[in-house]
Image (cartoon, helix red, strand yellow):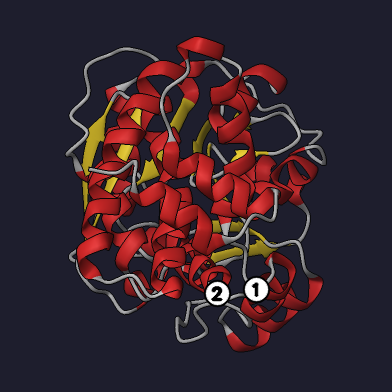
Amino acid sequence: MNKNKHKVAVLGSGSWATAIVKMLTENLDEVAWYVRSVYTKEHFKLHHHNPKYLQQVLFNPDQIKISNDINKVVSYADTIIIAIPSAFVKAELDKITVDLKGKIIFSAVKGIVPETLLILGEHLKKHHDIPEKNLGVIAGPCHAEEVAMERLSYLTIAAKRKSVAKQMSGFLNSWFIKTTYSKDVFGIEWAAVLKNVYAIAAGMAHGLGYGDNFQAILMSNAIREMKKFIKKNVDKRKRNIDNSAYLGDLLVTGYSIFSRNRTFGSMIGKGYTVRSAMAEMRMVAEGYYATKPAYEINRKLGDGKAKTPIIDAVYRILYKNTNPKNEFVKLSEKLD
C-alpha cells in the first residue's frame, strides 16, 4: 500500500503526541491531529507549533489536518495512534461515536486506564470491541524532547500481524528514527507502564540523596521485578527482557533529565507532597496513575502474586503517605 495514500491520525496534544506527529510528517503528505483545546488548535493555525509542548518544532500547516473534533479526526483515519495521558483517555474515547471496526489502533499511552485498571490495548479490546489483530503498541527508549532535536532514537513497534507493524514502521522510520518489531503486544505495553513506576522510585532515591551505586542496584532489581510481574500478570511466554522495549526504556526513563517520572519522584524524595509536585511540574507523570493499579492487579493473585518490593514501596509512599526515607531503608534490605 502506498503510505502516502494511507490516512493516519494522532489523538492527543502532549509532548509525546507532538513528537509522533513530527515523526509521521517525515514520511506522510498529510496527518490528522486531534487536540482537545480550541486554543491549541487556533494557536497552531497561526504559528504552526504546539503552544504548550515542544514549541521549537515547527510544522508545515499544509501537512496537518488539526481539529478539536475527535469524531472528525477518527472518521478521516485508517490508522489511529492514541497518545492521550492515561488519566484522561477513557473520557476522550467515550466521545467517539464513529465506528472503529476495521481501523488499526496503536497505543502510545504508556499508562493504565484508571477506571478499568486495564492497559489501553486491553481496554480497547474489552470496551470498544477492537480485535487483537488490529491493535498495536509504539514503545521503546525514546523521549519526545530528543525526537524534537532529531537525535538518533529507537522504537519498538509491536503488533500481532507483522504487516501492520511493518506499515507503522514505514510511517515512523527516518534518518533519526529506527524501528524494530515484536509480537509481544501486551507485554511491551505493560513494560511501558511499569518503567514509569520504577523511574519514580529512581527519582525518589535521588531526592533522598542516594548515589549512583544504589541507583544501579535499584535498576538491576527493577528489570527483574518487571519480568516477574509480566510473567505472572500477562503471560508466561519467553521474552528477552534485555531488549530495548523493556530494559532500554526502563534505563532511559530512570536516568534521563527529560524523564518527568524521575523528576516527580525526586520531588517526592525531597519532601514535596504529591499535589504540590504535580502542580509545580504542570505535566502528567504517568507512573503516579500506574502505581496503584499495578499494585492492586498484582495483589489480586494472592499467594501466586509476583514479588514486587519496589512497586509496593512506591505505592505506600504515594498512596498511603508513608515516609520515603523509612520506606527506602526497608527497601534497601530487600535488594541484591
Which quadrant of the view contains residue 285?
Answer: bottom right
- Residue 248, percent from left and from top: 23, 50
In the rendered image, the quadrant that contains the C terminus is top left
Near-viewer residue (200 or 164) = 200
Residue identified by numbered label 2:
267
Near-viewer residue (191 or 316) = 316
**Image height check: is 216 above or below 245?**
below
**Image height check: is 155 above or below 64?**
above
Q: Residue at x 48, y 27 (%)?
A: 135
Circle 1 packing at 10 Å, graded few (<14), some (14-19), many (20+), is some
Compute the Cα span from label 1 to label 2.
Answer: 6 Å
> Tag 2: residue type?
Met
Near-viewer residue (25 or 325) = 325
- Residue 247, percent from left and from top: 24, 45
Whether residue 153 is visible: no
- Residue 12, percent from left and from top: 62, 57
Circle 2 packing at 10 Å, graded few (<14), some (14-19), many (20+), is many
- Pointers 1 and 2 in contact (CB under 8 A)? yes
Whether residue 297 is visible: yes
Instruction: Count the numbered circles shown.
Output: 2
Helix, strand or loop at disc 2? helix
Q: Residue at x 66, y 81 (%)?
A: 280
Q: Residue at x 29, y 61 (%)?
A: 252
Residue identified by numbered label 1:
277
Near-viewer residue (51 or 58) = 51
